[in-house]
Amino acid sequence: MDFLKPTADCPDSVPSSTETGGTNCLAPGGLSDSQVLQEPGDRSHWCVVAYWEEKTRVGRLYSVQEPSLDIFYDLPQGNGFCLGQLNSDNKSQLVQKVRSKIGYGIQLTKEVDGVWVYNRSSYPIFIKSATLDNPDSRTLLVHKVFPGFSIKAFDYEKAYSLQRPNDHEFMQQPWTGFTVQISFVKGWGQCYTRQFISSCPCWLEVIFNNR
């Protein structure tokens, strides 16, 4: 597949940042979730990230301004969105097992041709995005990305082409149709026992700002 490529770095490499793993699980400036998504004319962030464990969202939306973001659970000298610092009440053994496997996690990068997701962990990740499949497809496929590889998870031009020109709801709600779902370790969909991502132990929702 032309949208799949190996990462330049080894999956077990440590980022060059020497800062300790600080993360901000709150919206910048103390904004609420709705303010992060609906702030009129706000171009400061290009996406926000939500972390879920099964059907429960853990922490607040994480707003992304920099062109690249590391999302990890336990990463020495890591700087970015540290899932391990979020408070979770989930006692499920499966959730805890998958948490322990997130490790170095993923890197989310906004590039000229779209948004790429690099799998830096030691286990596969699973991604569903409207821009990865045929526009005429009735069912979106879930794509498996192996450790050390990356995938162009979101293409802005394709996303705009999927929207109707006079779609008022789309114009008023920038996250409509601009969402990518990423599950750690466990897949879902027609090829897996889990039919819905809300049945996956640990997963991310990436909501893009189309403005």
Image (cartoon, helix red, strand yellow):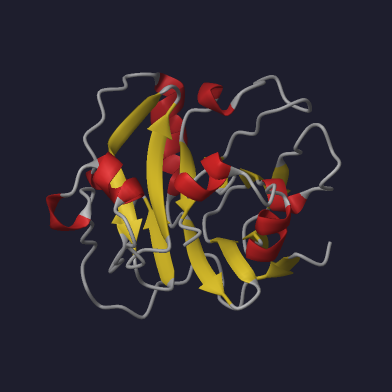
Q: Residue furthest left?
A: 30
Q: Which of 129 and 171 lies nearest the eye of the viewer?
A: 171
Left or right, residue 189 beside residue 118? right
On screen, 77 above or below 102?
Answer: below
Q: Horizontal placement of 22 versus 96: left or right?
A: left
Q: Position of residue 113 (x, y in %)?
A: 66, 74
Give me the residue at 66% from left, 29% from top.
188
Task: Say how many tags the image has.
Answer: 0
* Residue 150 seen anywhere in this rendered image of the structure: no
- Is the residue 168 above or below the residue 105 in the image? above
Which quadrant of the view contains residue 50?
Answer: top left
Res 80 → quadrant: bottom left
Q: Residue at x 82, y 67 (%)?
A: 2
Quadrant where the N terminus is found in the figure = bottom right
Compared with 116, 89 (above or below) is: above
Q: Position of residue 30 (x, y in %)?
A: 13, 50
Residue 67 in the image: x percent, y percent?
A: 43, 73
Q: From this view, report whether residue 100 is shown above or below residue 90.
A: below
The answer to whether one can see residue 109 in this image is yes
Residue 148 relative to residue 175: left or right = right
Q: Nearer the viewer, residue 210 or 144?
A: 210
Image location of residue 204, percent across then percent down: 47, 42
Residue lying at 39% horizontally and 54% vertically, measured from the top left: 72
In which image quadrant can residue 53 be found?
top left
**Residue shown at 29%/50% (left/top)?**
36
